[in-house]
Image (cartoon, rainbow, N blue to C red):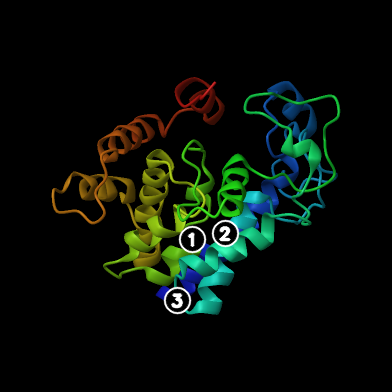
Amino acid sequence: MATLADRAVGAIVGAAVADAAAQPLHWIYNLEKLDSLIGDVEAPEFHQPSANPFYRIATGRNSCYGDQAFVVLESLAECQGLDVADLKQRTYQMFGPGTDYDSTENAQYKPHEGVKKSYPIYSSWRHFSIKDFLANMEAGKEETGSLEDDQIDGATKVAPLVALYTGQPDMLEKVEDALRVTQNSDTSVVAGLTTARILEQFILHGRKDHVVETVMAELRRPDRESPTDLDQAMLSFLRKVLDNRGGPHRTVVTEVFSNN
């Protein structure tokens, strides 16, 4: 029987492995292209060679999502808890000037620009929130998180934070403080907090039915921890997840949850 500590470690390792496993097929939005690559393959994880249309790095390496989670983990371990100042410095050192993320091609990329003829680049891909973070650090700003970027980065790096603070009353506060280092958007933060609430249930209890329903009930409580103005919107999204969980994956993703 796995202990709480086992499950906490499993959350961190599982997130890191999953990110690396998906990285070679990352951001392939052309479904015909994706089908031609994996067809009926039952285990497309760690695809070789990489077919990522934007950037190419070795199979087995983490993407920018996974590297952000690693920086959080490293800072928590070295500081024996969340130290926002340390996390800022480590994040800058991981993604800043002179690193594998320092690419002219990537720096020139604009939102929704699509795949250029000069792509893929043969280095890591720096995300928009990280670009904003670096600019804010270099400008000497106290609040370093991106005000504009509300993509999924925050939710992908909560595992080390939840693993350390599971069951503690300030868990969500710690998660929010860490997320706002690179993303100061309320949308990205509430997505990260909701992810943390769900993950905490599994770390605390292991395999458990009705976790999403449990979190939804928690979000309805007037006295809930770390309330936000967007909690009701998250309730709506979670209800949509439950309503569509029996549907074909591709249909649900492209027709129900499409952001195009």
> Which quadrant holds residue 176?
bottom left
Let me know if residue 207 appears in the view. no
The residue carrying pointer 1 sits among few (fewer than 14), some (14 to 19) or many (20 or more) residues within 10 Å by Cα, namely: many
Disc 1 marks which residue? 159
Residue 85 vertical position relative to residue 131 in the rendered view, above or below: below
User: Where does the C terminus fall, quadrant-wise?
Assistant: top right
At mark 2, the secondary structure is helix
In depth, the one of 25 and 99 nearer the eye is 99
Q: Which residue is mark 3?
A: 5
Label 1 close to label 2 by CB (< 8 Å) = yes
Q: Horizontal placement of 36 versus 137: left or right?
A: right
Q: At label 3, which amino acid type do we have?
A: Ala
Mark 3 or mark 2: which is in front? 2
In this figure, what is the number of numbered marks?
Answer: 3
Mark 3 element type: helix
Where residue 254 sits: x, y (%)? 54, 23
Residue ID for mark 2: 69
Kindly identify the amino acid type of the residue bearing the numbered disc 2: Ala
Answer with mark 1 or mark 2, whichever residue precedes in sequence: 2
The residue lying at 44 percent from left, 42 percent from top is 188
Q: Are marks 1 and 3 in contact (CB under 8 Å)?
A: no
Q: Residue at x 29, y 38 (%)?
A: 230
Query: Looking at the figure, which quarter contains the N terminus?
Result: bottom left
Question: Is 118 drawn above or below residue 199 in the view shown?
Answer: above
- SS at mark 1? helix
Residue density around tag 2, few if under 14, some if 14–19, many if 20 or more, within 10 Å: many
